[in-house]
Image: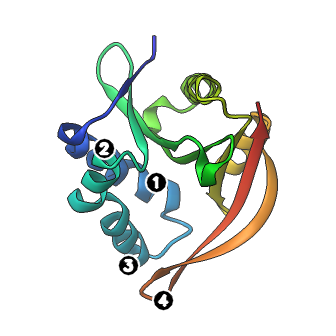
Amino acid sequence: MIKITEAFVEDIAKIQEIAHITWPITYGEILTAAQLDYMLDLIYSDEALSKQIQNKEQLFYLVSDLESVIGFIGIEHNYKNEAITKIHKIYLLPETQGKGYGKIVFNSIEELALENKSKELLLNVNRFNTALNFYKKLGFEIKETVDIEIGNGYLMEDYVMGKKI
């Protein structure tokens, strides 16, 4: 049983905890330790998360099983004023992989997107991230290749993937 509930400012510590567990595993072979630390601080600082949550720049949700919080998502409806829901963040603890939780979470995101009149889901994924194959299995297709400068001389080397809903 998976439950998805809206996250608030008081949930920031849990979001940060999950990010600090999942990121080194997800990106440890892709990014340098310095870039990993830089990005975690940039994206998951108290200030950055507070601003995003309070200003509703992204809607954050906690993903829980029967026992505890096992992940989080950050999405944005009406992305660029279009009928698109952008998935900015989706991270589940490593021990949940292979249990079908990811598919359940994506189905929930799709439901939220449809409730908000979206016709497409979008996400960025690092070009070397193994999750790329998972997204393809879910019906996402590569729309473009992008390099995004994030400061400190670092680039995010991503694919933008989309799925019509």
- What residue is pinned by disc 1? 25
Measure the alpha-carbon separation of dots 3 and 2.
Answer: 21 Å
Q: Quadrant of residue 67?
A: top left
- Residue 147, percent across and down? 65, 76
- Residue 8, percent across and down? 26, 36
Q: Residue at x 48, y 64 (%)?
A: 28
Measure the alpha-carbon separation of dots 4 and 2.
Answer: 26 Å
- What residue is pinned by disc 2? 15
Q: Quadrant of the N terminus?
A: top left
Q: Amino acid at mark 4?
A: Gly
User: Is the Cβ of the residue at disc 4 closer than 8 Å to that at disc 2?
Assistant: no
Q: Does residue 127 appear in this view?
A: no
User: Is the Cβ of the residue at disc 3 closer than 8 Å to that at disc 2?
Assistant: no
Q: Which mark is residue 153?
A: 4
Q: Residue at x 23, y 61 (%)?
A: 47
Q: Quadrant of the C terminus?
A: top right
Going from the N terminus, do you reach mark 3 or mark 1 first? 1
In the picture shown, does residue 101 fall above or below 148? above
Going from the N terminus, do you reach mark 3 or mark 2 first? 2
- What residue is pinned by disc 3? 34
Q: Amino acid at mark 3?
A: Ala
Measure the alpha-carbon separation of dots 1 and 4.
Answer: 23 Å
SS at mark 3? helix
Q: Amino acid at mark 1?
A: Ile
